[in-house]
Amino acid sequence: MQSKLIIKNFGPIDNATLNFKSVNIIIGAQASGKSTIAKLFTICNSPKSYHLLPEDERRISFFSLTKNKRDLEIFQKLSIDKFKDSLNIYSLEGCYSKKTEIIYDCPTHYLEIKNDKILFKDKLDLNNILELEDKKKYKEVEKEFDKLAKLSDRFDLLYKFSVMWSRMSSEEKFKLENEDLHDKFDEFSKDFNKSDKNLTDTEIYSIIEQARKTKVEIFYNSPLYIPSERVLVHLLKKAALNLQRYDIPIPEHLLNFASVYNSATEAIKNYDLNFINNNTLYKNVNGEDRIYYSSRKSIKLSESASGFQSILPILLSIKYEKEKTKRLNYSFVIEEPETNLFPKAQYDLLKILESGRLDDYGKIDKGSMHLYTTHSPFILSSINNLLFAHKKGNDNNQKFFENINKIIDSKSWINPNDFSAYQVSSGKVKSIFNSETGLIEQNMIDMVSENIINDFREIALSSME
């Protein structure tokens, strides 16, 4: 899902425009503003972060029965104060001033902060669809549904299934077995977008109700923010709720993540870590996190290598959040995924994370977005490999697909059309992605190590007689 973020006069960022895609990477020196951009993206991407919510925010909608427009509402009203509260959660309150300007534009909504005022445009306005239906503009209604189907695989499925089911007789439904239903749906889906849908009013009302559920899913669920301080969550996870209750001065976004991680370790009892070290397994045994090197030999996670303590909060939290509600359009932001990891482990971690964009049927999730901030040249090189694999694997009618798939599993490949990369420096950003090669600029990868290489060269020259 593509989106644009424009930032002016916000902390270390003077003027920056970023066009985000499905997979994104931001590099830059310490305190350059990488985290500032990543945190702001997280907030802007979640309309719940800047709206007041109704008391019955999660009430079930019965719109298809009631036809009550109130059943379509999911927010009470827009609030600049709520937006500022969200900045505080991510320790960004000091970045904001009356000169700050922020624009976030994506397929689901438009947000603008300017002159200490907030503007929001809902691009998934279900009342608008209802008005089109009232005016019998059925083609326009279909266009609105098709637009949402392009953003959410789940809605796409529900949309088609709802129409198919409504057009089946009671006798047909009674006779169907599970396998027959799957085949019938596949056949119906193939023809669905090729012909006029001729939706009835009843079908439209039912689809609008499904659209509302999808809208709640999109607007209420912000990307999972995984901070660079994640190694601390092993100490915080058990105490997260008490720390929040007693207002202990620890960044709230870190406490929130510790709470997610605590739930993840309670739900996920083991995780294979062979990609870091052969025959290594994480287990939660009687509430204690342990690393097993064999069936008998183990150590407490808190006493294990720092790489395990850094990588498990990433892997377990993402797995837990994705499985918790079985929802699609799952997005995350990871600060410095390379922390405490050997270069090969950094590479393997990225392959695991990017393979997660596929659903159970091998399709790329339409709405998911991944954002990484990094200092590591190994992360940049790893990303380039995943981009290059996609490019070469799909060249010449996929002539070399199987050969390249043996080197890097195609599940991890990144389509260059779905990728962006930026460098943050001196309050501005610039793209470091070469659209012609489909890769991150090689000189940017080399530049990360340039000072080290220069010193080595100077030492060698200085020691020559």
Image (spheres, helix red, strand yellow):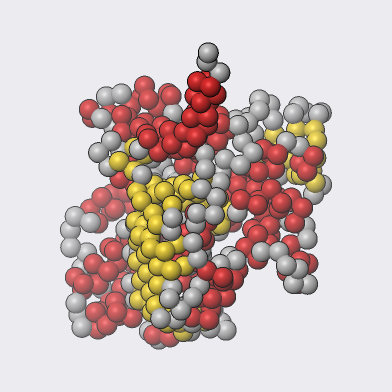
* Quadrant occupied by the N terminus: bottom left
What residue appears at the point 68 percent right and 62 percent down from the top-left corner? Answer: 255
Residue 9 position within the rendered picture, expressed as x and y whole percent measured from the top left: 43, 69
Q: Is residue 405 visible?
A: yes
Q: Nearer the viewer, residue 171 or 372?
A: 372
Residue 123, horizontal then vertical, whole percent? 33, 72
Query: In this orientation, does residue 319 appear?
Result: no
Looking at the image, which residue is at 53% across and 13% down? 465
Question: Observer-nearest residue: 83 or 30?
Answer: 30
Q: Is residue 244 left or right of residue 8?
A: right
Side of 336 where 142 appears, left or right:
left
Please tell me which residue lies in front, 338 or 395.
Answer: 338
| Residue under the image location 20 percent in, 68 percent down | 198
Q: Is residue 50 above or below residue 190?
A: below
Return the residue found at the far top: 465
Q: Position of residue 131 (x, y in %)?
A: 27, 82
Pinpoint residue 339: horizontal percent, then vertical percent. Answer: 61, 42
Q: Is residue 173 left or right of residue 269?
A: left
Up the image or down, 66 lies above or below 185; here it is below
How many badges with numbers are in the image?
A: 0
Q: Which residue is depicted at the point 49% across and 61% down?
A: 12
Answer with the quarter of the image where residue 394 lies: top left
Left or right: 435 as drawn, with respect to 109: left
